[in-house]
């Protein structure tokens, strides 16, 4: 796959919007060909140009109503070396590699959102999200002056999430995630 972003633009009528979104969802849900395999028979050339999920770093879809028309724009950014989504980049830092606190918190926000979304859907969160969140949490509690008095309770909730994750206990994971959300909100109410 090319390292350049793919861009698609189209004007849609109100009647075309729902079928277009359903087609996009079907395309995303369909398994792509394995490396080296030919695309599935019957797929259009445009569908064959869409990268496999493992090759995608980000997909942005914007649909706006402008002047009585629906303007649909989609941008697909491929995975590339140095991409923030690149698993070989080693996004998760350790306590001996200080980084900007705001960057750490932003990454934690994304991984925790992924964990909560999975749990709310009744399924186990992705290992990547849990491992990233827990590793970043260990680093976060080393930063002084950002809610130190909450760190002990927060770390306990992280240990509960770890236990539940290792046991595969969705109910306990959800309880731990709620406890983490509560600790976060208490801290942010005071420090933000």
Image (tube, helix red, strand yellow):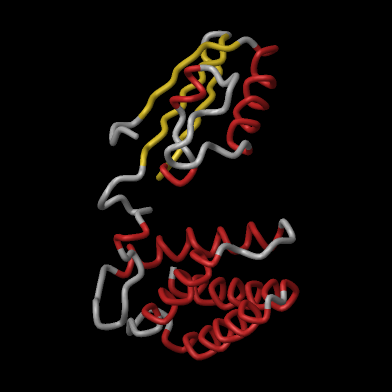
Image vertical order of residue 126 relative to residue 183, above or below: above
Question: Which residue is farthest front?
Answer: 37
Q: Is residue 93 left or right of residue 70?
A: left
- The image quadrant of residue 157 is bottom right
Residue positioned 32% across, 65% down in the render: 90
Residue positioned 36% across, 39% down in the render: 78
Q: Position of residue 86 (x, y in %)?
A: 35, 54
Q: Position of residue 62 (x, y in %)?
A: 50, 28
Image quarter (top left, top right, bottom left or bottom right) of the C terminus: bottom left
Q: Is residue 3 left or right of residue 69?
A: left
- The image quadrant of residue 1 is top left
Q: Is residue 13 left or right of residue 2?
A: right
Q: Please tell me how many numbered marks the rendered image carries.
A: 0
Image vertical order of residue 42 relative to residue 120, above or below: above
Residue positioned 40% across, 45% down in the render: 57
177 vs 29, nearest the viewer: 29
61 vs 165, nearest the viewer: 165
Residue positioned 68% across, 19% down in the render: 19
Q: Is residue 51 left or right of residue 180?
A: left
């Amino acid at each position: 796959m090319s390292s350049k972003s793919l861009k698609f633009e189209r004007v849609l009528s109100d009647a075309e919007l729902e079928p277009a979104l359903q087609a996009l969802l079907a395309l995303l849900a369909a398994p792509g060909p394995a490396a080296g395999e030919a695309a599935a028979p019957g797929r259009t050339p445009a569908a064959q140009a869409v990268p496999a999920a493992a090759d995608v770093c980000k997909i942005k879809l914007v649909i706006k109503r402008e002047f009585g028309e629906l303007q649909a724009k989609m941008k697909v950014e491929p995975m590339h070396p140095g991409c923030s989504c690149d698993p070989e980049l080693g996004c998760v830092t350790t306590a001996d590699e200080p980084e900007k606190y705001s960057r750490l918190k932003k990454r934690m926000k994304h991984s925790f959102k992924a964990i909560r979304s999975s749990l709310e859907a009744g399924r186990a969160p992705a290992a990547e999200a849990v491992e990233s969140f827990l590793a970043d949490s260990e680093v976060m509690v080393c930063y002084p002056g950002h809610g130190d008095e909450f760190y002990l309770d927060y770390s306990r909730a992280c240990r509960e999430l770890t236990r539940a994750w290792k046991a595969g206990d969705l109910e306990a994971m959800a309880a731990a995630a709620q406890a983490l959300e509560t600790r976060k909100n208490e801290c942010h109410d005071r420090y933000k």
